Amino acid sequence: MKGTAVVAIGGNSLIKDKKRNGLYDQLANVRDTCHNIAELVARGWNVAITHGNGPQVGFLIRRAELATEELPLIPLEFAGADTQGCIGYMIQQSLMNEFHRRGINRQAVTVVTQVVVDRDDPAFQNPTKPIGGFMSKEEAERHSREDDWTIVEDAGRGWRRVVPSPDPKAIVEIAAIKDLIDRGYIVICVGGGGIPVVDQNGELEGIAAVIDKDYASSLLASEIRSEMLIISTGVEKVAIDFGKPEQRELDRLTVAESEAFMAAGQFPPGNMGPKVTAILRYLKNGGREGLITSPAAIVAAMEGKAGTRIVP
């Protein structure tokens, strides 16, 4: 066994074509990604898998908004739990089918995961994460009044709900996750960054927020002492001067180089910034290597033929 790698799959990577975003379309994309993850397992890696769920939560909440004449709205933390189960099912089934085809005697399991956040996190005073679809001003005012939503106008396209994005502090089910990994299971966990909960004198309570899945993946990788944190995204390599004529893709970065590029504004908050920050947190917490690449290039990246490797 080569060790354990945490592989973070982006929620957007499950939807390659906005016109083909149904659940069976997403399942087909999951199968493509799981083909590459199964190859890592075949090559001797143990794997823990995390995933985003932004678009999926958005779809679920929008369906609920359209059905408010007959059904109650879905609280955000319940939407997170719902999508953890749905996406976990797709990954589990896809991996098990890959293992069957390859003659690999391994089993994938999903752990619906809660992640503790601090109620005093500054993010709760400054909600910034858009959730759900666009609304008219009248709809926005009604939700603000009746459901206590924070609403902002989004670039003239309409009104949208925003929620806090606090930092993850602890993974509630971490002992079970470690035990499953130690027993050889492929564990799918911390989906969507985990269901945000606050600790109320030892009792957990869900809270309306969204945790960055890359930050939660970094925390998971540190907690299980994984040898590698792989963050998959829409590009094969990290680049500086992105979108400019002088754009340059990077094969390898140190922590110091990454921090210098961050300080120079090369990795924006809404794009590559959280992914690089997540890997830096992992490395500073004792991690060995981080890797950023596209889902299709994961195997090649592990061989040093693709992706951007970040090292201490």
Image (cartoon, rainbow, N blue to C red):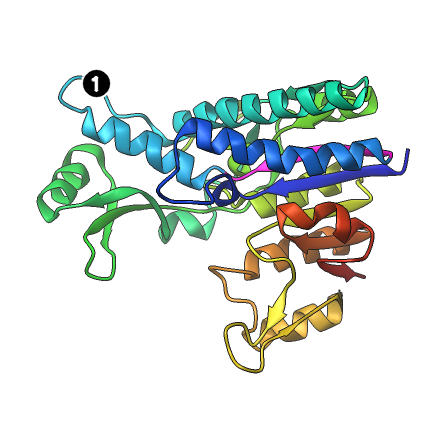
Residue 109: quarter of image: top right
Horizontally, residue 137 falls left or right of residue 116, namely left
Q: Position of residue 129 (x, y in %)?
A: 38, 49
The residue located at (48%, 33%) in the rendering is 26
Indicate the secondary structure of the residue bearing disc 1. Answer: loop
91 to 152, vertically: above or below: above
Residue at the bottom extreme? 246
Name the amino acid, label 1. Leu
Q: Position of residue 216 (x, y in %)?
A: 60, 42
Residue 216 left/right relative to 177: left
The foreground one among 271 and 235 is 235
Question: Dividing the image into 4 quarters, which one contains the C terminus?
Answer: bottom right
Magenta portion: prevailing SS class: strand
Determine whether 91 is above or below 258 in the image: above
Please name the residue that numbered disc 1 is placed on: 71
Residue 266 on the magenta span: no
Segment colored magenta: 44-52
Residue most extreme to the right = 1
Q: Quadrant of residue 100?
A: top right
* Most distant residue in the left direction: 138
